[in-house]
Amino acid sequence: MLIIVRGAGDLATGVIYRLYKSGFKILALEAEKPSAIRRSVAFSECIYTIEQNIEGVKAKKVNNLKEIEECWQKKEIPIVVDPKAQYIDILKPDIVVDAIIAKKNYGTNIKMAPITIALGPGFIAGKDVNIVIETMRGHNLGRLIFEGEALANTGEPGEIGGVTKERVIYSNNEGTFKAIKKIGDFIKRDEILGYVENTPIYATIDGLLRGIISDGYVVKSKFKIADIDPRLNQYDNCFTISDKARSLGGSVLEGILSELQKMGGKNGSKYFGEDF
């Protein structure tokens, strides 16, 4: 089965990784200039670096169908710049997963594939897609929604180590970002992380820099720049898929299997065999 995943940021990477490990063939679609800050654990980074290896799984930027096929033959994950999702019409996948997590819908609809799944707010299950998955941290994280919507975006990051909004840093102005620090660095409060033009970006807390936007990225005012983890003993977390991303990946897998069972008959036997 072919799954096309829209988005390859850090949370989408948890989904892609889990589906890949479960034996699915994956194609991921990305923007021309991805804005992930947890770049060390985001397959979207290969748009800049050509290749990205995360926990033993390799993704590669590709430009056409021939290169996509070559990736599949090598057991790699192809990532293509396609913000309008044109490859969905070309390849007609069995499953489409919208993992952009932009809190709004950038054109994903229930007719794109036999099974459609979307992560987070901005979608109505049963109308826009078959299943919506809750992305807000807490008791309902990863819950499958078959009717209705995910919880609305609060605008406040989830709690990590007792810290919420202070751990995420935003730009104060627009311009080109120049990084001073890198992912994995130990940071002190008020230390300079980088500059947007000539305006310094300061750390808001002590901790580990687990995410920072690409050097040279052109940001807008109030744009997410960096993410600091207050837990100083969690260095390896900077370079491994997060608990939230893995949870969402498991939920997408559950959703796919749930929908396949509902199909039954001819459609079900296509995937499970004639005895389904």
Image (tube, rainbow, N blue to C red):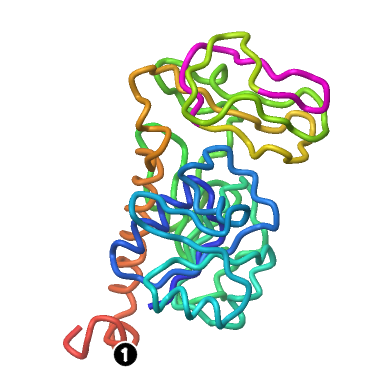
Query: Residue 252's spot in the image, x, y percent?
Result: 38, 57
> Hey, what amino acid is under mark 1?
Lys
Q: Quadrant of residue 196?
A: top right
Residue 174 on image: x %, y %: 82, 31
Q: Main secondary structure of the magenta part?
A: strand
* Place of residue 18 in the rendered image (x, y in percent of width and height, measured from the top left): 34, 57
Camera-nearest residue between 156 and 73: 73
Can you say which quadrant of the picture contains the C terminus?
bottom left
User: Which residue does the image show at 41% across and 67% down from the upper left?
Assistant: 76
Q: Is residue 140 left or right of residue 8?
A: left
Decide if residue 198 is on the left or right side of residue 87. Answer: right
- Residue 19 or residue 44, whichever sits in front: 44
Residue closest to the eye, 42 or 153: 42
Figure check: 171 above or below 147: above
Question: x%, y% of residue 210?
Answer: 48, 30
User: Which quadrant is home to the N terminus?
Assistant: bottom left
Q: Is residue 95 above or below residue 17?
A: below
The verdict on residue 54 being magenta is: no
Residue drawn at (47%, 65%) of the image:
130
Dividing the picture into quadrants, the one containing residue 108 is: bottom right
The residue beneath circle 1 is 266
Q: Nearer the viewer, residue 7 or 77?
A: 77
Picture layout, residue 142 above or below residue 195 = below
Identify the magenta region. Answer: 194-210
Q: SS at mark 1?
A: helix
| Residue that appears at 56% across and 46% down | 121
Q: Is residue 141 visible?
A: no
